[in-house]
Each structure stands twice: as C-alpha cells, then as structure tokens.
Image: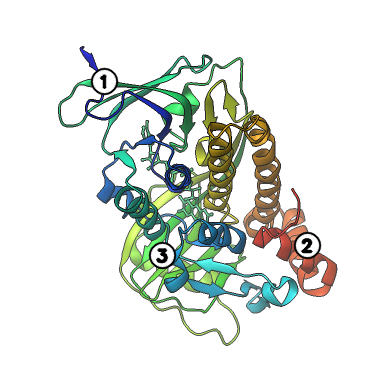
Amino acid sequence: MRVTTDSPSPRHVPVVVVGAGPAGLTVGNILRAASVDCVVLEAESREFIERRPRAGVIEEGAVRSLQRRGLADNLSKRAQRHSSCEFRFGGERYRFPYTDLTGRHHWVYPQPLLVADLAHEYVDVRGGDARFSVRDVALHDLDTARPSVTYTCPDTGELRSLTCDFVVGADGPRGAARAALPTAHARIARHDYGIGWLALLAEAPPSSDCVLFGVHPNGFAGHMARSPGVTRYYLQCPPGDDPENWSPDRVWSELHQRLEGADAPALTEGPLTEKRVLDMHDYVVEPMTYGRLFLAGDSAHLVAPIAAKGMNLALHDAFLLGDALVAYLDGDDGTGLDGYSEACLRRAWDYQEFSQWLSEVFHGAASGDPFRAGTTFARLRRLFTSPAAAAAFAEQYLGASERY
Ligand SMILES: Cc1cc2nc3c(=O)[nH]c(=O)nc-3n(C[C@H](O)[C@H](O)[C@H](O)COP(=O)(O)OP(=O)(O)OC[C@H]3O[C@@H](n4cnc5c(N)ncnc54)[C@H](O)[C@@H]3O)c2cc1C
C-alpha cells in the first residue's frame, strides 16, 4: 500500500497523541495552550466518544487542575457537588460525611460531557488537529529520537505517516500503544477479582443525594447519580455473565433488595439504557515509558471502577505529562519527563491498593465464606466507630493525600 504524508498538515509534529479520551484530550489541550503542535489520532468518531457513557465521579483535585488550565467552564457550572456517601448493610443505613472529615468533596459530572468539553476546547477553541475514525494505528521507532505513527485514513483508505519527537499513548486498555511495548521492557502486573459487575444506566432520577453502597449477601449493589434524569447502578454478578440473564424485573428486584435501608425512600425505577457486564480486573504497566513513548491513563494502568478512580488517574497522568512535555520542548533539562513514570505510578499503586481494600468490603459478604463475611462487617463497623479509620478512608476515597 502507498504511504503518504498528511499534506497539507505538517509531516512532522512535536507530539502525536494516540487516543481522544480524557487523558489524550487533556494532554492535547495543555500542548495547544503552550502553542505546541500536536496531532490527536482517535479510532472512533467524535460523535461516538462524546456519547460513550462511563465515569462520573471526579476528585476535587482533578477538577481544580482542570479549572487552572481553563478546561472546566461547563463542569464548574453543571457538576453536582457531593459531600457524603452511604453504606447500607444489615437493613440499616450508615451515612459517611467525608467532607466534614476532610473539608474536601467529590464532583459528579458524566464522562461524555467532560470528553465533549475537552474535544470542543482542543479542536474548536485552541485549533488542535484531531483525526477521528482512523484505523490501523501503529507506532514505530520508539527507541529513536524520531519515532513515527502510521494509520489508515478513513476517507481515502490510504496509509498515512507522521513523524514526531514524542508519542503519547492514551488509547486505553485495548489500544495500540501498550501493544507496542517490547515484552522484555515492561512489567505488567495484573489482578483479577474473579467477580463481575452488571453496569447499568437507568433513565431515572437519582434516588438519593449521595452515592450508595449496598453490602448484601446476594452481592454488592451501587447507586451513583449521573445527572438529574440519569442514574448509574451496579449489581455484582458472576464474571462473564450474560447481560440478557438480567431482565428489567430481575434488575430492579435485586437493586431494591441489596440497597434496602431503614426508612430509605424507594428507588425510582426507569428504562435501562445500558446493561453490560464488566469483569473486574486491574493492571499496572511499569515503567510507563519506553524511549519516546509515554503511556497515560488506562493504557498504563487499569483500575476496576470499584472506587471510581480510573478517570481521576488518567487526568492526573495527563496534567503531569502535558506540563513535562511543554517544559521539555521549551528547553528544560527533561527532569519532568524523566520523573513522569515514577510520579504517576506512586499514585496508581495507592489507588489500586484502595480499590482492592474496598473490593473486600463490597464483596466479602457475598463470598459464601463466613470468615470473609465476618471481617467485611468488622471493616465496615470500624469506619463508623473509629475516627482514625474514618479519616484514613475519607482521605483515600477522595484522593486527598498530600503526598503519594
Ligand atoms: C462503567 C464504568 C464506570 C466508571 N466510573 C468511573 C468513575 O466514576 N470515576 C473514575 O475516575 N473512573 C471511572 N471509570 C474509569 C474511566 O472511565 C476510565 O479510567 C477513563 O476512561 C480512562 O481515560 P483514558 O483517556 O485513559 O482512556 P479512554 O477513555 O479509554 O480513552 C482512550 C481512547 O482511545 C481510543 N482508542 C482505542 N484504541 C485506539 C487505537 N488503536 N487508535 C486510536 N485510538 C484508540 C478509544 O476509542 C478512546 O477514545 C469507569 C469506567 C467504567 C467502564
């Protein structure tokens, strides 16, 4: 096949970003704000990525960093501020007021809205070059000073090539960037929880003003507001379960049971617009760099959505990487790029550990093992009897530690 350059766009750009998720678009925006040229390559269409539902809970630190970079105008106007969460177990309700303990809170803002805001700012406001619906993205010569990225143009079917100084691999868990790492170079540590979550979106208003965690012998259930008319629910299920095994009647019956709590208002039901099974697993790639390739977000570390941490980690990587690339291309000594992987991994491992801890709280009661169920309830009770345990939980849940 004939390989062409991207005329009239430049054949060489300082940075090629693979993936237009929260990580890739944030890096792109930081680069454009510093007038650094870059190209963002995305396998899906712009319409698709602006509608793809996923995360919703964003840490205060991430929101402040977005605000400082002029990337949170809509979020600041529309996001809901949350100051507590509620555990339900043994038919009782236990409210956990994390803002009272830390002075910090969570924001709820659906990921597709954030992605749409970031894409708008990058393409329409900052004049960034983004190429959507590209195919066959491949990374080359990453261990040289002049790597390149090839892809198939969706309109012409031609193979295109861009050379660059740096490649940002922000293309998620199944992208091309992580696959380009030589196996001898990177260590990939994996953890499989051996459970599934049925992830649901309901066209129904939230039934509580906070996130609900139901710890029940039938399995975990979660309730998370997304917007005034949409609520995300989770139900623990066997890994690999078929979503078709979950009729709306079965879904709502299990949600009512697992989220039962004394005097709690009944859940408001509505049509289910998303129903898919997530097999809960984590991984971490170490180091997150290879030659001129820098991984960011889910391509480098996947954290199961147990503690709502994945997008927060992706944004954190993007802030560090965007700033370090700008500083390097502006003539600094490369310290930021050299320390990038280690700085990101410290936080990534901390969040992985918290997710593992929380997983035991959520799932131990339904394990069928009375010993695990006993320790699960001991962990839960400790949160409501020990101020020190409550403070530690709040700090981890909010990602509010001063240092990682
Ligand atoms: C149901 C669910 C709920 C979640 N809830 C939360 C939450 O509340 N809080 C939280 O912090 N996190 C949450 N997460 C995790 C969060 O959604 C991810 O961590 C986040 O999307 C990671 O962002 P990213 O930019 O690294 O990757 P992605 O968002 O996956 O973006 C990668 C992009 O790369 C593109 N791509 C893939 N392959 C290629 C290729 N070969 N070439 C070019 N482009 C490619 C993809 O189409 C995609 O647009 C949740 C996840 C799920 C599934």
**Direction from residue 11 to residue 290 in the image, left or right:** right
Marker disc for residue 392: 2
Q: Position of residue 403 (x, y in %)?
A: 76, 51
With respect to residue 157, does 254 lie above or below?
Answer: below
Task: Please give the name of the residue rendered at 65% of the width and 79% of the height, measured from the top-left corner.
Answer: 92
**Direction from residue 231 to residue 376 in the image, left or right:** right
**How many C-alpha atoms fall within 10 Å of the one at disc 2: few (<14), some, or many (≥20)?**
some
Marker disc for residue 73: none
> Which of 368/202 is in front?
202
Whole-Å distance between the Cαs marked 1 and 2?
Answer: 53 Å
Front of the two marks 1 and 2: 1
SS under mark 1: loop
Q: Pointer 1: what residue?
A: 5
N-term-proximal mark, 2 vs 3: 3
Q: Is mark 3 within 8 Å of ligand 1?
A: no
**Amino acid carrying mark 1 in the image:** Thr
**Amino acid carrying mark 2 in the image:** Ala
> Which of 15/389 is in front?
15
SS under mark 2: helix
Q: Badges 2 and 3: C-beta atoms under 8 Å apart?
A: no
**Residue lying farthest bottom?**
263
Q: Position of residue 74 (x, y in %)?
A: 40, 67
> Which of 393/340 is in front?
340
Q: Pointer 3: what residue?
A: 251
**How many C-alpha atoms fall within 10 Å of the one at disc 1: few (<14), some, or many (≥20)?**
some
